Image (cartoon, rainbow, N blue to C red):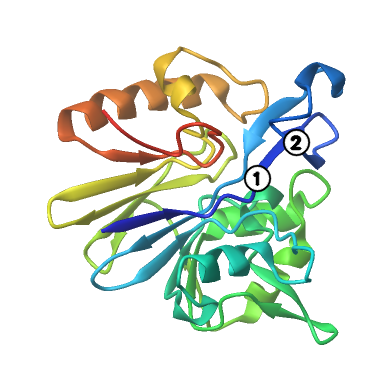
Amino acid sequence: MKIISLSEGAFTVDKTKQFIPFDLQKDKLQERNVGSLLVEIQPFVIVTSKDILLLDTGLGFTNATGVLQIHQNLLNNGIGPLEVTKVLLTHLHKDHSGGISHQQNGKRVLSFANATYYINKQEFEFAFENSKSSYMIEDFELLKNSTQVKFIEGNRIINEYIKYEVTGAHSPYHQVFWIEENKEIIFFGGDVAPQLQQMKNKFIAKYDYDGKRSMELRQQWREQGEREKWIFLFYHDIKTPVFKY
C-alpha cells in the first residue's frame, strides 16, 4: 500500500475554534491567544490494489488560485479528485470534514464525485443536532439524500479489508479505521490518536468528549500496534505524520 500525506499546513486553534494559519519559521505560539494549540491539518490517501482511499477531508480551504486545497494536494501527487473511490470519515468536526463539498459555479457540489463516503450514522445525526459547536453542516448537508453516502454503524468490515470501530471518546460517535493488505496494517485513529506524542504519554485532553477514554484507547493501540507492527497515521502531527514502532 502507498501512503500519501496531504498536508494543508500548520494552524493554531483556541476556544473560538477558528483555525489560524501558522508559519513555523516566523510565527510564535506565545503571541497567539492563551490556550492556543498548534496542529497540522493532514488528510491521507492510501492507494491499495482495490481503491484510492481518502482519510478525512481537511478544512475545505481554497488556495490562492481558487482551487480546493485538497484537490491541489492530490493533483500534486499525481491523483485526480475523480480517482478517489472511498472517503473514510472518522467524524464530522470542521477540520476533518470541510473538504467533503465545495462551491462550484454558484452551487455546492461533492468534492469527490466518484467516491463513496463512509460516515457513522449517529455522528451524522448528532452533527445536525449540535451544529453550533464544532460542526459546519453546510459542508456535508449534501450527503443527506446522496446515493454516494453509506451510513455505517458499530464495528464492521468494508470490502473485507477495511475495518472500522466506533470509539466515541473525542466526539460521541467518533470512529477509527484499520486498512489491511498483503500483511500490512495501517491504523488511522483520527482525533482519538492525533499525534505521536499523545501515544507516549498518559495525556487527558479537555477538548475530548471523554478524555480518559481517549487516553486508555491510545495506550491500548500503542501496545497492540507495537506487537503487530501497525503503521500509524497522525492527522494533527506536525513532525511525524506516519510512524511505525
Q: At which x and y percent is residue 142?
A: 69, 76
Q: Which mark is residue 227?
A: none
The amino acid type, in three-letter code, at marker 1 is Gly
Residue reaching furthest to the front: 25
Query: Could you tell me if the residues under marks 2 and 1 are in contact, i.e. CB atoms within 8 Å?
Result: yes
Q: Residue at x 22, y 54 (%)?
A: 180
Q: Is residue 222 left or right of residue 211?
A: left
Q: Is residue 224 left or right of residue 126?
A: left
The amino acid type, in three-letter code, at marker 2 is Phe
Q: Residue at x 70, y 60 (%)?
A: 60
Q: Earlier in the sequence, mark 2 or mark 1?
A: 1
Q: CA distance from mark 2 to mark 1?
A: 8 Å
Residue reaching furthest to the top: 202
Residue tagged by mark 2?
Answer: 22
Residue tagged by mark 1?
Answer: 9
What is the crowding at mark 1: few (fewer than 14 residues within 10 Å), some, or many (at least 20)?
some
Residue 93 visible in rendering: no
Q: Nearer the viewer, residue 1 or 222?
A: 1
Q: Residue at x 44, y 27 (%)?
A: 196
For numbered disc 1, what is the local secondary structure?
Answer: loop
Which image quadrant is residue 113 in? bottom right
